[in-house]
Image (cartoon, grey):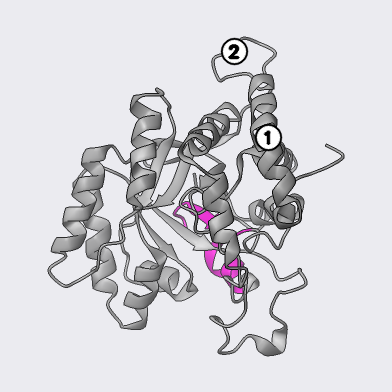
Amino acid sequence: MSHQIHRRTFLKTSLAAAAAGDALARTAEASVPSAEDAAGARPLMPCGKIADLEISRMLLGGNLLTHFTHSRDLRYVYNLTAQYNTEEKILETLALSEKHGVNTLVIHTVPFAQKILMKHRHERKGKMQWIICPTAEIAPDMKAYSDHVRQLVDEGVDAIYLWGVRSDQLVAEGKVDLIAKAVDIAKDLGVPSGVGAHDLRVIVECEKRKVDADFYIKTFHHHNYPTAPRADELAGVYAEIPGYWCRNPQEVIDVMKDVEKPWIAFKVMAAGAIPPQNAFRYVFESGADHFIAGMFDFEIAEDARIAREALAGVKRTRPWRS
């Protein structure tokens, strides 16, 4: 498209997008063949396999659907997103993602969003798979966490991962044994079980301790954007730089190249600071097996096309691990 609308420019076009969003979504949805269409349908998203799940290389992120936008210091954007992403709009977003071959959603446990997922699956007959991180507290007896995981499994979750906020904290406190327990709880209930992380030390320690995770979800983006941290700012400012979730991209690449578990990258656009044309190819060429993209409905068609094109020409040094 000659004129691209992305979350990266959403703030500048929010009023127009709010008025035109429904029309754009209806037009895009009507023009996209479903997975069941006969020969001649546009190619769907390539997939990889994690445990027994076929998962699209691009996954739908849940933050925009739960209205948690990572909008830096622009606090009004949270309310703006909530006004736009109504229940019906979220259902449209899920259906449109499926039609473009994005078959899996990664999301936090937010009650109103979970109800919408149930409606999509049971009333709308949607096929979107759910990878969900429980937000229950982690304690040595693991009861609260175990109860939360069991509830999610009963609701039909397809995979579980330990929330990165929790795993970062546990590694900082030297409690990797509790990460291993969290992983085992989900596996014992019969679903693939992974570990999320912002801090690379989580991956390093899990590999060192041979934590039996099925996959990792790790932040990853380059620093080639205007508000990225400069080299002399890297020490001790992780929480102070807006839009900064990957302290040292090259270090992540170096560690992950030897990790044999599937790697799902997230924050790949630094919450809208990096264009998808740049971000998607970078993460695949750097070794990620899948990536998560938070998308409004009007971004899905274009982002899916960009992801397919990146995959078609990707040159990797790390083997595909899924």
Query: Relative to the observer, which residue lies in front, 11 or 260?
Result: 11
Looking at the picture, which amino acid does disc 1 mark? Ala
Image marks 1 and 2: residues in contact by CB distance under 8 Å: no
Q: CA distance from mark 1 to mark 2?
A: 17 Å
Q: Quadrant of residue 304?
A: top right
Q: Does residue 138 sit above or below 118 in this rendering?
A: below
Looking at the picture, which amino acid does disc 2 mark? Asp
User: Which of pointers 1 and 2 lies earlier in the amino acid sequence?
Assistant: 2
Q: Secondary structure at mark 1?
A: helix
Residue carrying label 1: 301
Residue that lies at the very extreme toward the top in this rendered image: 38
Task: Residue at 22% x, 63% y: name it.
Answer: 181
Which label belongs to residue 37? 2
Q: Does residue 19 sit above or below 231 in this rendering?
A: above
User: What percent of the width, then of the height, locates residue 287?
Assistant: 61, 56
Which segment is the magenta one? 251-268
